[in-house]
Image (cartoon, rainbow, N blue to C red):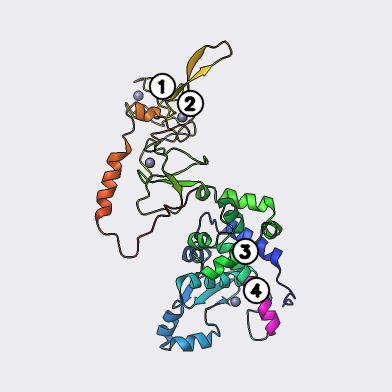
Amino acid sequence: MKKVPSYIRKKFVANKVYSFLLESKITELPIDIKELCFYHDWPLHPYTSVAKHQSRSLEFVRKKLRSKDGKAYKLGTDHYEIFYDNTKPSVRQRFTIMHEIGHIVLGHLDDFNGINNSLTKYEYKILEGEANLFASLTLAPPSILQRLGFMSDAPLIRRFCNISSEASRYASERTEAQIRALFPSHMSQTLITLFHDYIHRKHCRVCKGAFISELEKPHCPYCGSKAIYWGRKSNMSKIYEGIEVDETSKALVCPICENNELQDGDFCPICSISVVNQCGKMSLDTDFHGNSWPTPCPVSLKGNYRYCPQCGGKSTFLINGLLKTWKGEYYKKLEQAEAPPPFGSEVLPDEDIPF
Ligand SMILES: [Zn+2]
Ligand SMILES: [Zn+2]
Ligand SMILES: [Zn+2]
Ligand SMILES: [Zn+2]
């Protein structure tokens, strides 16, 4: 059995958070705690189920586990289970479960024989501090918040990480220097790469299309609009249908004649349609002799893009009638959505978040 450290090992905790995020393949916020526990095979036991199962009161369970919020146990050599008080507010439950995961991941249950009463009050405080730090850095990863531009904005942290006001205030008080000390730039960069699609996910107010773009102010690839915001998916969020293309934006099969031998050139050898989805907008280029000629916008597009995110020009697939405009699909989806959604499934869009 190891000796409990005499201080909170911040750097050690940050390293564990880093490898935990990577290992758990977490790529977006807010973290789905239940899915995470399922992934790691850490069964979750709500206090009310334990009480019911044992025909005891909730108070009895809290006393028995010696915890008002939650507790992790090591069962057998390599198996952990988490108990938590599911009568607390949901943001608190999330923090509690992540705190218990912290005890597991930081090795507290292996190295210090669990969080039991043989610990001194001081030792207990150190381990609790480490688990709290783990929960905070995992639920509100500073590198990601910094990249999104709201590392000091407690209300936005609260909203996007789904944590309590208290936890978000605490997270918002970290300084850039503190973050750099915990997550040096190579670590931050790796996490940012992991969250790439989340960071660059955009939504269109007009057609409700969802897409990923690194451009700061893109056009919507489905309807061409510039009414774009960054934020959480709404239940209207939509990825429009399209034609399957390879990494050079070339259709795998000709959408007109179904010829699948499209190896050479940009046109189908059978029906001669352009099978590459590109921006169809031409601009006039002028050389130093004053001669101008039209040149196409050099952007390759995904198989379902009707517009070029960069210049808003129509795509060759749309121009050639290979893709329908967004409206048909949109209204079909709207009709389906008019049936009342299942209870509790409404998600409010974050339309007021500019990017
Ligand atoms: Zn604890
Ligand atoms: Zn749109
Ligand atoms: Zn063809
Ligand atoms: Zn373009």
Q: Are marks 1 and 3 in contact (CB under 8 Å)?
A: no
Residue 331 falls left or right of residue 95: left
Q: Residues within 10 Å of mark 3 (few under 14, many from 20)?
A: few
Seen in the picture, residue 113 relative to 162 is either above or below; the reply is below
Q: Residues within 10 Å of mark 4 (few under 14, many from 20)?
A: some
Q: Residues within 10 Å of mark 1 (few under 14, many from 20)?
A: some
Mark 1 or 2: in front is 2
Residue 57: x, y in percent?
A: 43, 88
Residue positioned 32% across, 28% down in the render? 321
Measured in 3D between alpha carbons, the distance from the residue under mark 3 to the one under mark 4, in whole angstroms, is 17 Å
Mark 1: secondary structure? loop
Mark 2: secondary structure? loop
Residue positioned 44% across, 37% down in the render? 219
Residue 152 located within the stretch drawn in magenta:
no
Q: Which residue is denoted by mark 4 in the rendering?
A: 129
Mark 1 or 3: in front is 3
Residue 245: x, y in percent?
A: 43, 34
Mark 4: secondary structure? helix
